[in-house]
Amino acid sequence: MNPGMVIAVHSYKGGTGKSLISTNLAAIFASQGKNVCLLDLDLRAPSLDATFAADGKYWMNDFLEGRCEPIDILKDFSKEKGTEGRLLVALANPSMQAIREIVTKNGKWEMRALHRLLSLRDILLKKLAMDYVILDTGPGLSYASINAIAAADVVLVVSTWDSSDVAGAQGMVGELYGLLEKRAMVLMNKIPAQLTINEEMRKKLANQFKKAFKLPVIDLLPCYCDVLGLERSTIIALEKPDHPFSKSLVEVVKQVEKAKDALKPRPDQRPS
Ligand SMILES: Nc1ncnc2c1ncn2[C@@H]1O[C@H](COP(=O)(O)OP(=O)(O)OP(=O)(O)O)[C@@H](O)[C@H]1O
Ligand SMILES: [Mg+2]
């Protein structure tokens, strides 16, 4: 049985911190010796190329289009980033031409793209023995994000405390994740720092969001001005492991690992 897990990092609104969190979670897993693959599935507004330098001529877009093989889009950053485990990354093409091409795609193309994404998932988990595959998605209910969620075992919903973000994310949890029968957990991000200093207030807020989403809330990450000011090329968890943001994400990683354990069939469920 393959023990790997695919996590889609999703949100209702844009700019909640999905790419930052996906990148740092991937980096932490890899620095802990896990084999990880990070895929940029935000084809309409790619951003991982600002953190991981592209060198090949093929992108995620080309793979989904059927123009190349998985091996052509996967680059190993473990040496460059100094991680113990493998850190594979597939980037989306940030050129205007590629984005223009993507926005013209119809449902039929997206169905084919889903099949290709599912085949990539299989290769990553079964042939390349990835422990974790992290899908950085675009916000809301675009076809590409729905495909990412369909391909995932677990959805990590990143929400700010903005009421329209929470309401929209609640809707997605009820409608989309329910329909696709996906397990989900919530990570609240960019919470005003003064609301997270006091432990009691923090617990109260976490409970409030737990009730709103009817899902586990794994943490409340404050908004850090210095994180906001970082260059995208900085992977904070690797370069500043003592920063409270990095430490919080190490805790998030532990929660994700627990979720992975919970996915394993119990001995009485295993085929005999
Ligand atoms: N906890 C935080 N504190 C401070 N800044 C943060 C925090 N989380 C994310 N940011 C910053 O917010 C900005 C948006 O983050 P990011 O690009 O990861 O969001 P996103 O959800 O991927 O956006 P999009 O929906 O456009 O893809 C970035 O500048 C990032 O560094
Ligand atoms: Mg993003």
Image (cartoon, rainbow, N blue to C red):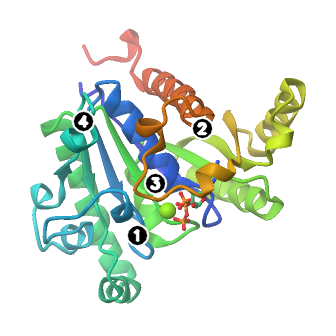
The Cα–Cα distance between marks 1 and 3, rounded to whole angstroms, is: 17 Å
Binning the other alpha carbons within 10 Å of mark 2 as few (below 14), some (14 to 19) or many (20 upward) gives: some
Indicate if the residue with disc 2 has its beta carbon within 8 Å of ligand 1.
yes
Element carrying mark 3: helix
Instruction: Please tell me which residue is depicted at 31% across the width and 63% down the height of the picture.
Output: 114
Q: Looking at numbered disc 1 in the image, what kind of residue is underneath it?
A: Pro
Mark before the other along the chain sequence, 1 or 2: 1
Q: Is residue 65 above or below residue 234?
A: below
User: Residue 93: x, y in percent?
Assistant: 29, 74
| Residue at mark 4 | 130
- Tell me the residue at 35%/73% (across/down): 110
Residue 57 in the image: above or below residue 129:
below
Amino acid type, mark 4: Met
Disc 1 target residue: 46
Which sits earlier in the primary sequence, circle 2 or circle 3?
Answer: 3
Indicate which disc, 2 or 4, sits on the residue closer to the N terminus: 4
Quadrant of the drawing holding the N terminus:
top left
Identify the mark nearer the N-term, 3 or 4.
4
Q: Which of marks 2 and 4 is in front?
A: 2
Mark pair 1, 2: CA separation: 23 Å
CA gap, disc 1 and disc 4: 23 Å
Asked which secondary structure carries label 2, the reply is helix
What residue is shown with label 2? 245
User: What number is the disc on residue 149?
Assistant: 3
Q: Distance between the Cα atoms at labels 2 and 3?
A: 26 Å
- Disc 4, ligand 2: is the CB inside 8 Å? no
Image coords of residue 235 (percent x, y): 42, 46
How many other residues sit within 10 Å of disc 3, few (<14), some (14-19) or many (≥20)? many
Mark 3 beta carbon near ligand 1 (under 8 Å): no
178 or 61, nearer to the observer: 61
Residue 153 versus residue 203: which sits nearer the camera?
A: 203
* Foreground tag (1 vs 2): 2
